[in-house]
Image (cartoon, rainbow, N blue to C red):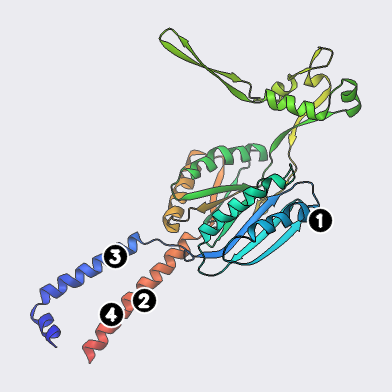
């Protein structure tokens, strides 16, 4: 009762206190981190290993069994399951609830590094991933054009759109699907290659050595210091055709003298269509500590700027999770206000 009497006698003080609470609430809501799902670390880790060209049985015996044996020695392991398929090994490690996931992943990485020497030479380095509920794309963007080819459109998406989006502080990764990619195809007749005393391995080594930039150190020239490097990086198909190949008898030929070198499209592994038309799809994933709503807003701003700067290309955000989150937050704020007003009315009536 004393509190009520004090509140009635000092209405200005009570009004100021309530105003301060409301202002703090409004500021907190504006600064609040918003995401579709809570930031939860599931006690699950996945070890994925690529072994191209190998069948399921070879993958299981040469890769999966060894990785399973290595990670099974980590503390707080609940269960270990695995799947071996063509060219890929997948080991799923379930930890006990309450276990330190970061510590377990670090320990798994150490255990796997100890057995990497026993894996086949063609095996890719095992990748350890944690399950992230917020790893899904926060925005999907479609890039299409009636005046550009699929090759040029994909180059535009990679060099312009992707590069622009990756600069945003809240963006973790930008993935592109669809379109065509160029590749240089080198076809050699095995009999002719054998007649020249060469092998495909030797050709591969020559191309690797000719397609690299090597530092050559520095040279002091008076008061100046000059940095020396070998600019051998191939930039066009003509550079590949002119690659010198030395035979055992000392003769030097160009690669195009005995090989058919063409520029063609890579085998299509993904197709993207929007409203029945071919397009490039871009999926934007936010960083784990970023605000989804803020990230989506910045992505939309960049898309609008790119659309204005490139009128011959249609760049459109077809789906994003920021609006849904904003609507949910607005609904919560609306319900809070309605609840407060109804409480005041009920108290006033009684």
Instruction: Quadrant for residue 75, please give it.
Output: bottom right
Q: Mark 3 points at which residue?
A: 26
Q: Mark 1, mark 2: which one is toward the viewer?
A: 1
Which of the two discs, 4 and 1, labels the residue nearer the N terminus? 1
Q: Which residue is drawn at 14% across and 85% down?
A: 4
Mark in front: 4 vs 1:
1
> In the image, is residue 161 above or below residue 202?
below
| Marking on residue 57 | 1
> Do the residues under discs 3 and 4 have CB atoms within 8 angstroms?
no
Q: Nearer the viewer, residue 23 or 50?
A: 50
> In this picture, is 298 found above or below 40?
above
How far is mark 1 from mark 2, CA to CA?
A: 58 Å
Residue 10 seen by the camera? yes
Question: Which residue sits at x=55%, y=65%?
Answer: 43
Query: Which structural element holds mark 2?
Result: helix
Residue 290 is drawn in which quadrant? bottom left
In the image, residue 12 sits, relative to residue 62, either above or below, namely below
Q: Name the residue under label 2.
A: 335
SS type, badge 4:
helix
Tell me whether the residue at label 4 lies in contact with that at label 1, contact meaning CB atoms closer than 8 angstroms: no
**Residue 223, disc:** none
Identify the residue at image location x=47%, y=56%.
Answer: 288
Sequence-wise, the earlier of marks 3 and 4 is 3
| Cα–Cα span, label 3 and label 2 | 15 Å
On the image, the x and y values in percent for residue 202 come to 79, 26
User: Badge 4 is on which residue?
Assistant: 341
- Residue closest to the eye, 92 or 167: 92
């Amino acid at each position: 009762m004393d509190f009520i009497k004090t509140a009635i006698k000092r209405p200005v003080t009570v009004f100021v206190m309530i105003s301060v609470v409301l202002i703090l609430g409004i500021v907190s809501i504006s600064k609040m981190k918003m995401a579709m799902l809570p930031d939860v670390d599931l006690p699950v880790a996945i070890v994925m290993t690529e072994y191209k060209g190998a069948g399921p049985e070879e993958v299981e015996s040469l890769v999966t069994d060894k990785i399973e044996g290595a990670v099974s020695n980590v503390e707080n392991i609940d269960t270990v399951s695995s799947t071996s398929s063509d060219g890929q090994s997948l080991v799923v490690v379930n930890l006990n609830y309450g276990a330190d996931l970061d510590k377990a992943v670090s320990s798994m990485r150490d255990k796997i590094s100890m057995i990497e020497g026993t894996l086949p030479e063609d095996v890719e380095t095992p990748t350890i991933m944690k399950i992230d509920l917020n790893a899904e794309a926060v925005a999907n963007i479609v890039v299409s054009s009636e005046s550009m080819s699929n090759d040029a459109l994909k180059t535009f998406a990679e060099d312009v759109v992707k590069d622009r989006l990756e600069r945003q502080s809240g963006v973790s990764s930008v993935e592109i699907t669809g379109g065509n990619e160029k590749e240089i195809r080198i076809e050699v007749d095995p009999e002719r290659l054998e007649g020249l005393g060469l092998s495909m391995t030797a050709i591969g080594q020559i191309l690797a050595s000719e397609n690299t930039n090597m530092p050559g150190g520095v040279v002091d020239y008076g008061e100046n210091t000059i940095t020396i490097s070998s600019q051998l990086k191939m930039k066009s198909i003509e550079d590949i055709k002119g690659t010198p190949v030395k035979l055992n008898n000392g003769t030097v030929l160009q690669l195009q003298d005995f090989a058919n070198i063409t520029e063609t499209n890579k085998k299509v592994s993904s197709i993207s269509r929007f409203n029945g038309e071919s397009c490039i799809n871009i999926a934007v994933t936010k960083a784990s500590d970023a605000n989804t709503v803020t990230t989506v807003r910045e992505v939309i701003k960049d898309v609008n700027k790119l659309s204005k700067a490139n009128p011959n290309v249609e760049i459109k955000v077809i789906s994003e999770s920021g609006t849904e989150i904003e609507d949910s937050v607005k609904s919560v704020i609306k319900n809070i206000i309605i609840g407060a007003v109804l409480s005041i009315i009920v108290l006033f009536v009684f």
